[in-house]
Amino acid sequence: MSRPPFRIAVAGTHSTGKTTFLTRLKELFEQRGLAVAYVHDSAVNAQEKGFPILAHHTFESTAWLMARAIELETEATIAADVVLVDRPVADALGYLLAALRHTNRSIAPARAEALERICEAWAPEYDLSFLTVLDPSVELGAGRDGDALFRARAAEEVTRVVNRFMPGRHLLCHGGADAALALAITAFEDYEPEAS
């Protein structure tokens, strides 16, 4: 690999097409002979470790998810030409904010600011980012949390966080993936990393 890998992040609430889109994108890059690393969020691992997730997120679970995402994304850069990130760091903060709103909880402002600083510091690592748009008529995937109100709140808060920290993101609407796939391929082909 002669240049740093190209990183593409897709953010959004659950069952909005992130994984489907990234799976298709991975296939397209691999057809071009590129080494592709796919990094998925670690919520399942967080839950297995005993951290609360979804509407029960806490500062601790969010900090752990962010740290784990940064670790996995960084490890993926070792041998990949392209790193595909299913849920960037900002997603974790969006889900926490949705959980706090949904359950009428709060955290200390200093803790919220610490998480925001992580999002701000890490956002420039993504060369291209997408934000999915919630279509409530699309059914939830199998085994997904069925709380429609929380899902909508997560979409709102993730959107707010991504718009704040990842302003160059592109919207990814249900059924509109072909244009986004083409954009990702073109962006990779035009990629010229900054000197480190």
Image (cartoon, helix red, strand yellow):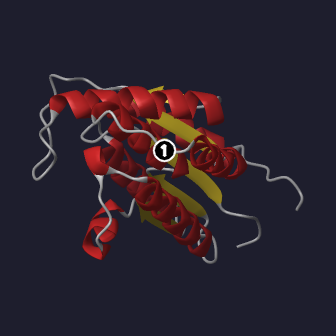
Mark 1, Cα crowd under 10 Å, few <14 / some 14-19 / many 20+, is few
Q: Is residue 105 above or below residue 39?
A: above
Q: Is residue 195 above or below residue 113?
A: below
50 sits to left or right of 9: left
What kind of residue is marked 1?
Ile
Reading the image, the residue beneath label 1 is: 107
Q: Looking at the figure, which quarter contains the N terminus?
A: bottom right
Where residue 117 appears, as percent x and y from the top left, is: 68, 47
Task: Decide if residue 36 is in sight here.
Answer: yes
Q: Identify the image quadrant of residue 47.
A: bottom left
Element at label 1: loop
Q: How many marks?
A: 1
Q: Nearer the viewer, residue 155 or 35?
A: 155
140 sits to left or right of 113: left
* Residue name at image x 39 percent, y 26 percent: 156
Where residue 139 appears, as percent x and y from the top left, is: 12, 33
Q: Identify the image quadrant of residue 172.
A: top left
Q: Is residue 83 above or below residue 108?
A: below
Task: Decide if residue 179 is in sight here.
Answer: no
Where residue 12 appears, as percent x and y from the top left, is: 39, 37
* Residue name at image x 14 percent, y 45 percent: 141
* Residue name at image x 38 percent, y 64 percent: 42
Q: Looking at the figure, which quarter contains the C terminus?
A: bottom right
Q: Nearer the viewer, residue 190 or 74?
A: 74
* Residue name at image x 64 percent, y 36 percent: 165
120 sits to left or right of 96: right
138 sits to left or right of 105: left
